[in-house]
Image (cartoon, helix red, strand yellow):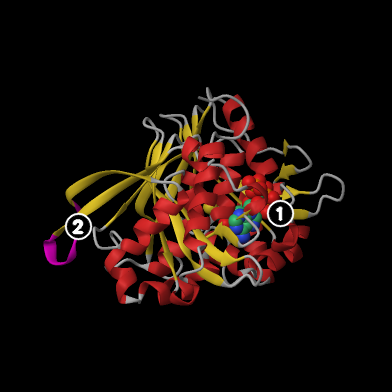
């Protein structure tokens, strides 16, 4: 394989080019952003004029390209290939967009252009590695055709001296063009609502509400796998888990006021069976109003129509009559009694009543 040339790469609405000395001001402006400091260890931090000039002077050695506006030539972001293996014909792809230029498709255009260029120059596989709590970057990877592959432990050595897990996405030269397929799509318009209850993807802004909810003894006792769980991390990584298609977590909100009322999710996806499990919790002030029933019906209706599930299952411990009533009112049918199905406190096992909902049960 020939060494990769260091040259401008045209893209859709962007051009990738080697940095120039007159990029210094824009680079200093871009590097001052907290997301860049956190997620892009290859950029200088702190970054004054001298550090930016030094980075530009060294850029060719590191394959750093600037993503620029094709009309004005002005810096919008950056993109590069690194960890190149000529033996395996693989590399990693990194990208960043200056805060002032985000949300306009520049990172996706740059990633798509450099990926196609790399394949045309003989590479066979490219990876994107993103932090689990960086859904914007993960969305760019998926949009540029990179498929979710898994989580690598402690790959990145952060500026703070901590090691961080990274989520790996990869694209092969032989993959079909276009975005990577996703098992679980986004919600239409970003939410589900029946006019009374609204479901929105859980995120970092919900952390305090989720922590308060899980602190309730009856909630902790009925949450499978809840003991010792890092709820800050759970909320920070929920969007990434959704993109991976592994777990769907939503906040239940009062549609009128927007107040947080609880949470609900889909877990244990079994794609071959077309089945997943739901679980939900309401804060005490919102119980007894039918909100959980509405939330389950909204979520299941979406899962049948848009995720392609054929069954949504749920389990409750035998004495959790309130939850059983929710499931029955939502249309679920009791299907079985599973002895010792759930892990209990101190190594015990708890019996579980199994319920299931089929699309025909929702009408
Ligand atoms: C990640 C980053 C490069 C995206 O740049 P961008 O130019 O805004 O990206 P695009 O406009 O091409 O695409 C943005 C995608 O992220 C989504 N997005 C934007 N901000 C988001 C946020 N805060 N949370 C979740 N998704 C977000 C957009 O909806 C879009 O996804 P879609 O195409 O599925 O709708 C930019 O946010 C950034 O520079 N972040 C800091 C550096 C970084 O994280 N680099 C990657 C390191 S692995």
Q: Does the residue labelled 1 lie within 8 Å of ligand 1?
A: yes
Neighbour tally class for label 1: few under 14, some 14-19, many 20 plus, Cα within 10 Å: few
Residue 140 visible at all: yes
Helix, strand or loop at disc 2?
strand
Residue 255 x, y percent position in the rendering: 63, 65
CA distance separating discs 2 and 1: 43 Å
Q: Is residue 39 above or below residue 272?
A: below
The span picked out in magenta is 341-348
Mark 2 CB lies closer than 8 A to ligand 1 = no
User: Which is more N-terminal, label 1 or label 2?
Assistant: 1
Q: Which mark is residue 103?
A: 1
In the image, is residue 5 above or below residue 330?
above
Residue placed at 64% from the left, 37% from the top?
Answer: 112
The residue under label 2 is: 343
Could you say which quadrant of the image residue 346 lies in? bottom left
Q: Which residue lies furthest to the right in this view?
A: 71
């Amino acid at each position: 394989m020939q060494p990769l040339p260091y040259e401008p790469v045209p893209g859709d609405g962007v051009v990738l080019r080697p940095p120039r000395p007159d990029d210094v001001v824009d680079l200093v402006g871009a590097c001052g952003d907290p997301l860049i400091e956190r997620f892009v260890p290859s950029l200088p931090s702190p970054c004054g004029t001298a550090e930016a000039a030094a980075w530009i002077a060294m850029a060719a050695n590191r394959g750093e390209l600037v993503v620029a506006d094709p009309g004005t030539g002005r810096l919008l972001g950056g993109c590069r290939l690194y960890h190149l293996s000529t033996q395996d014909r693989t590399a990693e792809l990194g990208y960043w967009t200056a805060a002032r230029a985000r949300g306009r498709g520049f990172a996706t255009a740059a990633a798509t252009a450099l990926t196609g260029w790399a394949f045309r120059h003989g590479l066979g596989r490219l990876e994107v590695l993103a932090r689990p709590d960086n859904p914007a970057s993960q969305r760019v990877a998926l949009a540029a055709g990179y498929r979710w592959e898994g989580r690598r432990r402690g790959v990145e050595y952060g500026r703070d001296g901590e090691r961080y897990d990274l989520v790996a996405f990869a694209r092969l030269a032989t993959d079909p063009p276009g975005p990577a397929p996703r098992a679980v799509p986004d919600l239409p318009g970003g939410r589900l609502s029946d006019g009374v209850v609204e479901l929105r993807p859980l995120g970092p802004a919900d952390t305090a509400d989720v922590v308060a909810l899980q602190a309730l003894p009856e909630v902790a006792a009925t949450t499978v796998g809840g003991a010792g769980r890092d709820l800050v991390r759970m909320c920070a990584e929920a969007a990434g888990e959704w993109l991976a298609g592994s777990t769907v977590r939503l906040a239940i909100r009062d549609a009128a006021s927007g107040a947080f009322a609880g949470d609900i999710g889909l877990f244990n996806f079994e794609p071959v069976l077309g089945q997943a499990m739901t679980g939900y919790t309401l804060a005490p002030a919102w119980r007894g109003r039918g909100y959980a029933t509405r939330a389950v019906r909204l979520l299941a209706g979406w899962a049948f129509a848009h995720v392609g599930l054929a069954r949504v299952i749920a389990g409750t411990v035998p004495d959790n009559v309130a939850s059983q009533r929710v499931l029955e009112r939502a249309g679920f049918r009791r299907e079985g009694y599973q002895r010792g199905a759930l892990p209990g406190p101190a190594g015990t096992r708890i019996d579980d009543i199994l319920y299931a909902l089929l699309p025909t049960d929702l009408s």
